[in-house]
Image (tube, rainbow, N blue to C red):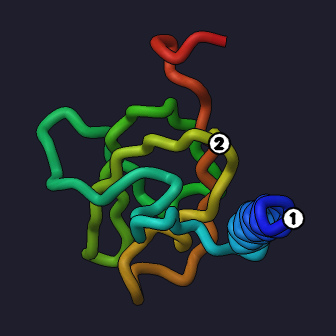
Amino acid sequence: MNRTISASALIASLVFAVGAAQAGTAAGNDRMFNGKSVHGEAVTATQGARVVKVDAGKAINVNCGDVVTFQSAGKSFTWKFSSASHRALDVRDIAPQGFTDKKLMVYVSRADSEGA
């Protein structure tokens, strides 16, 4: 009987943990358990990186794995997109604090190497 209660408690705990993780993402928490962004990571600017002026548009398309340098009002940051969900995001979701107040949607597609 103790095994049945323990197994039930374990299953209930796992269901709760998975539900909480999914709820966190749905509520706008774009961080994984290790604290990293689900959209990729900030990287050092590299030669050949695509440059996007945030103030010049409303949306851009990128592929998973692309490195993009975003510029706005004399500031810049570089981001490598590596998103498992390949969903749209606002650049303000990944930009450093105070980078811009302008909305720029980024649509992340699968890279050719990821398959269909």
At 57% from the left edge and 40% from the top edge, which residue is drawn?
A: 84
**Residue kind at label 2, given as amino acid type:** Ser
Mark 1 closeness class: few <14, some 14–19, many ≥20 residues within 10 Å: few
Q: Nearer the viewer, residue 22 or 99?
A: 22
Q: Nearer the viewer, residue 2 or 103?
A: 2
Please name which of the two marks, 1 or 2, marks the residue nearer to the observer: 1
Q: Quadrant of residue 89?
A: bottom right
The residue indicated by pointer 2 is 85
**Residue kind at label 1, given as amino acid type:** Met
Q: Position of residue 10 (x, y in %)?
A: 73, 64
The residue indicated by pointer 1 is 1
Q: Quadrant of residue 27?
A: bottom right
At 25% from the left edge and 39% from the top edge, which residue is drawn?
A: 49
At 34% from the left edge and 55% from the top edge, which residue is drawn?
A: 41
Secondary structure at numbered mark 2: loop
Secondary structure at numbered mark 1: loop
Horizontal side of 7 relative to 66 (left or right) equals: right
